[in-house]
């Protein structure tokens, strides 16, 4: 073959290669195999040696073999090399075939071949490097959200998304993990957890880090169960000893692909919404997006839109559930509870309280309720009545507000209500940061003569250190303790008895909520708990009915039937 024909062959080869968007594919190998005999080529390879910064970003040295057929490893190869970025070197290598001796002309053609091939592939290499950078998470050495969006979008465009499910996940208790085993080991556990999740996946399935302790994934529908098994808890070894293990789990929202989804953002948002609901509303390890979720979201949107108008028109009413002394059945106080009257109907609390909690509008409602309670107390006092202590609920969402104690005091003082008539109820928390802020709030309120109560004690993983460190005035025992048994020898009853004894010795009064039966009253008395509220005495009462109850003062209860007749 003449020199002109060889140049034409090279030109044709380059034109084919320029149309290939991949860095390494079978088409490359086929194209090289067609011209290798003409130029005496035995091997074509690519070598990458990343610089220090690229190594820190997760890049690793690599060798790519494009073509290999009996090369002469002792002969001098033809090279084309460049420094690309931050010290990273790339090199394309062309070796002769055994038995082929390149003269000057043949070596020149081989150089033209490897230089042209290198230039074409370098542009693809740099593009891939850019893609790697923008789709890779340096901290966890994993894919990132950009990669996840690309993969989901690809499946949508190919019409295959109905075979897959999109996950949005939050790894549980990462703060606790980092405090127990250290941040470095915590990061290592997260990396290994991601790798373990990837092990059950196949292309084009993928898992990625969204940011913080949030992860995402796209998983074939027939692999979802296996994926969920790992999410619900797996042990990760982060060291060489048996003790160096940590059990890690995640809460997930799952959106299964269907024709109703046309955008990647719609599926990611749906999965994230389910994850948030699983964590904060349902308290379950995972939730699938479905019609019920859609209805709940529509309800949430309706509640949020209606809330400002409802506040302005005072649609939220205060109902009072009496607190009763078990020593003489006398009304000694009440808990203020919220009822929403909208368009002639009562909106159930479970339809709006969780929504307001999530959107933080609950803070506005809590202060609204305190204002109306103080207004009611002022009216009772002005009309000559003898008011009783009223407790009002405050969400833990308030703990991010450094001005809360001042707002509470200003509201009470606006109506010139004695501070000792208000009890601020706060729900227990296991979060160390929330517990610290709660302690600061309780101390500030105590300095103002305002008492505090820890609500729903026993519902979660109650922290004894919280009772030790925070000077609550009252401990409110959750109804769940009473539903287990009325036998004082039962384990739950024994626990409750000691909690009551401990709280009393710490200077706190104890009150049990959710009391419904004479047997529960008997058990509470045996445990030296002499304050209660619940349907045994009264359901939450509107203001006028509660005023009548306070004036009557004492419940004349001899039996359950008597109680029912009174109501």
Image (cartoon, rainbow, N blue to C red):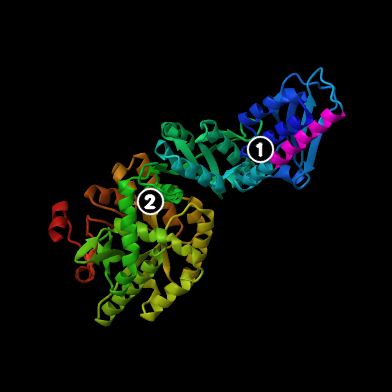
Asked if marks 1 and 2 touch (Cβ < 8 Å), the reply is no
Q: Main secondary structure of the magenta part?
A: helix
Q: Answer above or below: position of 435 versus 34.
A: below
x then y, percent, for residue 64: 70, 31
**Farthest right residue in view:** 104
| Dot 2 crowding, Cα within 10 Å, few <14, some 14–19, many 20+ | some
Q: Which residue is mark 1?
A: 15
Judge whether residue 117 is colored magenta: yes
The one nearer the camera, 349 or 334, is 349
Q: Answer above or below: position of 169 versus 473.
A: above
Magenta-highlighted residues: 104-122
The one nearer the camera, 404 or 66, is 66
Please identify the quarter of the rendering in which residue 342 is found: bottom left
What is the CA distance from the residue labelled 1 to the residue labelled 2? Answer: 60 Å
Q: Nearer the viewer, mark 1 or mark 2?
A: 1
- The residue lying at 35 percent from left, 71 percent from top is 368
Q: Is residue 120 left or right of residue 557?
A: right
- SS class of the residue under badge 2? helix
- The residue lying at 12 percent from left, 58 percent from top is 565
Q: Is residue 221 visible?
A: yes
x then y, percent, for residue 23: 65, 37
Q: Which residue is mark 2?
A: 281
Q: Answer above or below: position of 210 versus 308.
A: above
| Dot 1 crowding, Cα within 10 Å, few <14, some 14–19, many 20+ | few
Q: Answer above or below: position of 9 versus 288.
A: above
The one nearer the camera, 523 or 414, is 414
């Amino acid at each position: 073959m003449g020199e002109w024909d060889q140049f034409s062959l090279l030109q044709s080869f380059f034109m084919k290669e320029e149309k290939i968007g991949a860095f390494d594919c079978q088409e490359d190998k086929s194209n090289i195999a067609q011209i290798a005999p003409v130029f005496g080529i035995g091997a074509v390879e690519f070598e990458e040696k990343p610089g220090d910064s690229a190594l820190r970003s997760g890049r690793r040295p690599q060798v790519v073999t494009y073509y290999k057929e009996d090369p002469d490893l002792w002969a001098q190869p033809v090279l084309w090399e460049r420094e690309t970025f931050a010290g990273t070197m790339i090199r394309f290598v062309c070796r002769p075939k055994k038995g082929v001796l390149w003269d000057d002309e043949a070596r020149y053609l081989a150089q033209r071949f490897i230089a042209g091939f290198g230039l074409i592939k370098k542009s693809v290499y740099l593009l891939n490097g850019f893609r790697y950078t923008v789709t890779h998470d340096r901290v966890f050495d994993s894919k990132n959200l950009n990669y996840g969006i690309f993969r989901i979008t690809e499946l949508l465009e190919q019409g295959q998304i109905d075979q897959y499910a999109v996950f949005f996940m939050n790894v549980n208790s990462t703060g606790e993990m980092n405090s127990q085993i250290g941040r470095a080991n915590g990061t290592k556990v997260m990396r290994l957890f991601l790798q373990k999740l990837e092990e059950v996946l196949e292309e084009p399935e993928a898992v990625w880090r969204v940011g913080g302790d949030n992860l995402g994934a796209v998983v074939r529908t027939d692999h979802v169960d296996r994926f969920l098994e790992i999410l619900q808890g797996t042990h990760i070894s982060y060291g060489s000893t048996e003790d160096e293990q940590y059990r890690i789990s995640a809460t997930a929202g799952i959106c299964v692909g269907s024709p109703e989804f046309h955008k990647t953002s719609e599926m990611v948002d749906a999965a994230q919404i389910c994850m948030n609901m699983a964590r904060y509303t349902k308290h379950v390890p995972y939730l699938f997006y479905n019609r019920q979720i859609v209805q709940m979201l529509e309800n949430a949107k309706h509640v949020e839109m209606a809330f400002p108008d409802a506040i302005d028109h005072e649609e939220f009413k205060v109902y009072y559930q009496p607190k009763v002394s078990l020593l003489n059945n006398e009304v000694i106080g009440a808990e203020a509870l919220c009822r929403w009257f909208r368009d002639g109907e009562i909106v159930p609390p479970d339809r709006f309280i969780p929504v307001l909690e999530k959107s933080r509008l609950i803070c506005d409602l809590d202060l609204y309720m305190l204002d109306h309670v103080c207004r009611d107390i002022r009216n009772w006092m002005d009309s000559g009545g003898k008011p009783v202590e009223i407790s009002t609920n405050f969400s833990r969402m308030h703990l991010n507000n450094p001005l809360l104690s001042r707002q509470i005091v200003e509201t009470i003082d606006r109506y010139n209500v004695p501070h000792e008539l208000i009890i601020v109820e706060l729900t227990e928390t296991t979060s160390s940061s929330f517990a610290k802020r709660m302690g600061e709030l309780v101390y500030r309120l105590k300095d103002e003569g305002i008492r505090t109560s820890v609500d729903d004690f026993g519902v979660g993983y109650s922290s004894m250190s919280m009772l030790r460190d925070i000077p609550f005035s009252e401990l409110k025992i959750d109804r769940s303790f009473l539903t287990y048994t009325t036998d004082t020898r039962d384990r739950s009853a024994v626990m409750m008895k000691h909690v009551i004894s401990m709280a009393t010795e710490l200077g706190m009064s104890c009150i049990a909520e959710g009391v419904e039966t004479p047997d529960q009253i008997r058990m509470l008395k045996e445990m030296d708990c002499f304050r209660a509220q619940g349907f045994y005495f009264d359901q939450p009462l509107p203001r006028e009915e509660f005023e009548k109850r306070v004036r009557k003062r004492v419940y004349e209860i001899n039996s359950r039937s008597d109680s029912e007749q009174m109501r």
